[in-house]
Amino acid sequence: MERTLAIIKPDAVERRLVGQILARIEAAGFTIRAMRLQHLTKQEAEGFYAVHRERPFFPSLTAFMSSGPCVLVALEAPDAIRTWRALMGATDPARADAGTLRKEFGSSIERNATHGSDAPETAAFELRYFFRGMEIF
Ligand code: CMP
């Protein structure tokens, strides 16, 4: 079994897509191990995306991620990191395959509805960033 961090981003929460996205997550066989609605501060978003701090989109990305509440979810499944990334589709919704969450629900590369950890080390960092051990069931 493997765990990964999923985020339902502020654009999808604002558009009331949380239920549909969670239904897709459960239908795909993931177990939800922790979950919380949270409005990140700019500083919390900057800490989360620190690996991107030199990228030109960093100020805009962190402003967007702190613009409204998002849903933080710890997912568990065999091969969870890869499987969740496949369900989300490509980062840019315009390039995502049909049937993926970002294709269906994303509206731009920034407002792309969901986030997922990209490797085991990132998943460990991201899960720890948002959840204490006692909060993961
Ligand atoms: P996410 O998986 O949350 O990881 C970093 C985010 O940066 C990414 O999704 C995109 O929403 C956002 N982003 C904005 N512009 C770009 C870009 N040009 N390339 C990659 N990611 C971008």
Image: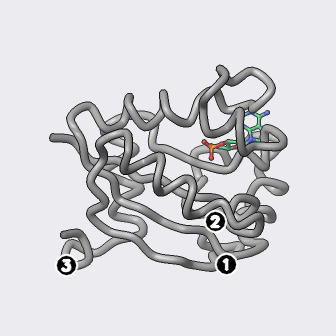
Label 1: which secondary element: loop
Q: Nearer the viewer, mark 3 or mark 1?
A: 3
Ligand 1 image-quadrant field = top right
Seen at 45% across and 43% down, the residue is 117
Place of residue 95 in the rendered image (x, y in percent of width and height, measured from the top left): 75, 21
The residue mark sitting in front, 3 or 2, is: 3
| Residues at circles 1 and 2 in contact by the CB criterion of under 8 Å | yes
Which residue occupies the extreme left position in the image? 1
Task: State the quadrant of the N terminus.
Answer: top left
Residue under the point 71% across and 33% down: 103
Query: Which of the image's four quarters has the C terminus?
Result: bottom left
Residue 127, picture quadrant: bottom left
Residue 67, how many percent across, how many down?
78, 72
> In the drawing, does residue 85 fall left or right of residue 98?
left
Residue position for label 2: 45
Q: Residue at x 71, y 65 (%)?
A: 10
* Amino acid of disc 3: Met
Q: CA distance from mark 3 to mark 1?
A: 23 Å
Q: Which mark is residue 41?
A: 1
Between the C-alphas of marks 3 and 2, the distance is 23 Å
**Residue flagged by tag 2: what amino acid is it?**
Ala
Picture disc at residue 134: 3
Comes first in the chain, label 3 or label 1: 1
Return the mark for residue 61. none
The response on whether ligand 1 sits within 8 Å of label 2 is: no
